[in-house]
Image (spheres, helix red, strand yellow):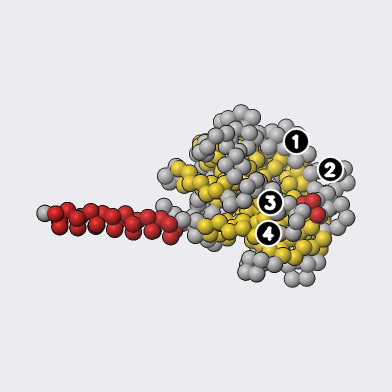
Amino acid sequence: MAQGWRAGVLFLVGVAAIAWANVAATAPRIEEFPVPRGSRPHDVAPAPDGTVWYTAQPRGELGRLDPKSGATRHVALGAGSRPHGVIVGPDGAAWVTDGGLNAIVRVEPTTERLQVFPLPEGREGANLNTAAFDGAGRLWFTGQSGVYGRLDPATGTMDVWDAPRGRGPYGICATPGGDVYYVSLAGSFLAKVDLATGATTVLEPPTKNQGARRVWSDSKGRLWVSEWVAGNLALYDPASGRWREWKPPGRNPKPYSVYVDERDGVWLAEWAANAMVRFDPVRESFDVYPIPSRGANVRQMLGRQGEVWAAESGTDKLLVVRGITSR
């Protein structure tokens, strides 16, 4: 009897140990990479060759990190440059929204040759923010001064429109189907763009004055929004027209940006907790992963298979989360 009791306890302890080991083995890991002092990286974009682009906003440069060696290289974008966003286009090049130049800048990854596409006359001071490519290979972008626009890289033709409610256009994304949505931080709305005419359809989140800052699509074409002022994560489903909202854990959360990984896990850069937060839409629950460095102030996030990259504007570092698994 005593031996059987002890054997049972040992068995249960062993099972618990194995379970804990599995959790520990599969828990996401955060690694940080320092970049040159004063870079204050704002947005980040993993490239097809394994390197990672980032905007060094105060320096007027586009940076490039080699995660294997930790080495960085900077490309000067021109006098007066103040780059905000960077993404990798269908052509493999880095595309930059540059508020200082009031232009879209293309950086060829091999030669680092620059192509500059200035905004049309009369659209000075747009305060360019973020960009996304639609299904036809056209670049759509936002400007916080109250505009959004479209560039056709094949012809160089650029169109710019006034946004509803004036100032505020901020994050922008494309769905797997090629549709384009943007959010307005000051206007507190989500918007769908008519790809043919450029007209905006405003979609009102349930919380007023919520400060919609960034937006990202999941694999189903649903839109996830980080509500900076309200401190919520919001979901809009175009198929049903339905909204939902969740409050991340912690006191007075401040979700800056949102990114959806290849498993449809929804990531938030959460300033109040200084953490990367992952929301599981199936369980409807949050997992919080503290950032090693204090005051990281993570801005934009982007990723690739098995990795989520983020820019720590407060610490002159980039970070990557690896070991991402579904529950």
Give whichever of discs 2 and 1 has the lower sequence position.
2
Q: Residue at x 19, y 58 (%)?
A: 7
Q: Position of residue 268 (x, y in %)?
A: 57, 46
Kindly identify the amino acid type of the residue bearing the numbered disc 3. Answer: Thr
Task: Identify whether 81 is placed above or below 256.
Answer: below
Label 4 residue SS: strand
Q: Residues within 10 Å of mark 2 (few under 14, many from 20)?
A: some
Vertical side of 206 occupied by 46: above or below:
below
Cα gap from disc 1 to disc 3, whole angstroms: 29 Å
Q: Secondary structure at mark 1?
A: loop
Quadrant location of residue 122?
top right
Disc 2 residue type? Gly
Amino acid type of disc 1?
Arg
Q: Which mark is residue 34?
A: 4
Real-space CA distance between mark 1 and mark 4, rounded to the nearest whole angstrom = 34 Å
Residue located beneath label 2 in the image: 125
**Residue closest to the eye, 6 or 154:** 6
**Mark 3–mark 2 contact, CB under 8 Å?**
no
Q: Which residue is mark 3?
A: 315
Q: Residues within 10 Å of mark 4 (few under 14, many from 20)?
A: some
Inter-mark Cα distance, 4 to 3: 8 Å
Residue 38 on image: x %, y %: 77, 53
